Amino acid sequence: IGVLALQGDFLEHKKILAKIGSDVREVRLPEHLNDLDGLIIPGGESTTIIKLIDTYGFRDAILESVNRGMNLWGTCAGMIVASKKLTDPYPEPLGLIDIKVSRNWYGRQINSFEVDIPFKNIGPKLFPAIFIRAPFISSVNESDDSIEILSRLADGTPVALTQRNENYKALVTSFHPELTNDLRVHQYFVQMSK
Ligand code: GLN
């Protein structure tokens, strides 16, 4: 599993992957994508991450890698980067999962919150979800059978989902499993990338 290490909390992802015994690599240049089973785009600042993706020539390289079967997981800013469309005119996301996203939906840094929510396919125990200036999935076609909603807030807002594409699977979470001691979402991604 690779963790895109351009900006944001890639170290936290790396630590959890190491804890669960997964072979993990920091991805700093497009050639580091070679042979990966999965790539995590971490939380951070999405405009910066997208700028660096373009500066370092990652846009086509990531597309080529998912087309040969590399799976993808975006957390928070990473979900913004992976999405098909933003409600903002700029920056241009990668379009790897069929959702539309609004950034900074839940307010400012001090409006960050943590809530225990159900998360499908990882067992019945609630997952401690940490939201930090989190994005909001403003549009997703829930009747598309390639899409599976994994987690929702109490008001029904989807906050984690997967999409099965022809060559790869994408996972997005608008919160930060890498900031918890709960390893289950990382285990889930590793498992789905085998
Ligand atoms: N608000 C950030 C953005 O727009 C995302 C924050 C995060 O990753 N915690 O990129």
Image: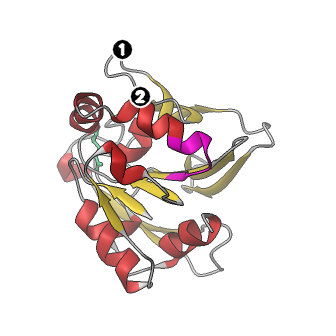
Residue at position x 63%, y 69% in the image: 194
Mark 1 Cβ and ligand 1 under 8 Å apart: no
Residue 128 in the image: x percent, y percent?
Answer: 43, 72
Between marks 1 and 2 in the image, the one whose residue lies nearer the viewer: 2
The quadrant of the image that shows the N terminus is bottom left
Residue span colored magenta: 65-72
**Residue 13 in sight:** yes
Q: Is residue 191 left or right of residue 39?
A: right
**Residue 75 in sight:** no
Binning the other alpha carbons within 10 Å of mark 2 as few (below 14), some (14 to 19) or many (20 upward) gives many
- Name the outermost residue toward the top: 89
SS class of the residue under badge 2? loop
Which one is in front, 166 or 97?
166
Identify residue type, mark 1.
Answer: Pro
For the residues labelled 1 and 2, the Cα–Cα distance comes to: 10 Å
How many marks the image carries: the answer is 2
Q: Is residue 174 above or below residue 136?
A: below
Residue at position x 43%, y 30% in the image: 60
Q: Which quadrant of the frame does ligand 1 lie within?
A: top left
Q: Is residue 36 above or below residue 144?
A: below
Residue at position x 38%, y 22% in the image: 92
Residue 144 in the image: x percent, y percent?
Answer: 78, 37
Which one is in front, 166 or 156?
166
Q: List the residue tagged with mark 1.
A: 89
Q: List the residue tagged with mark 2.
A: 93
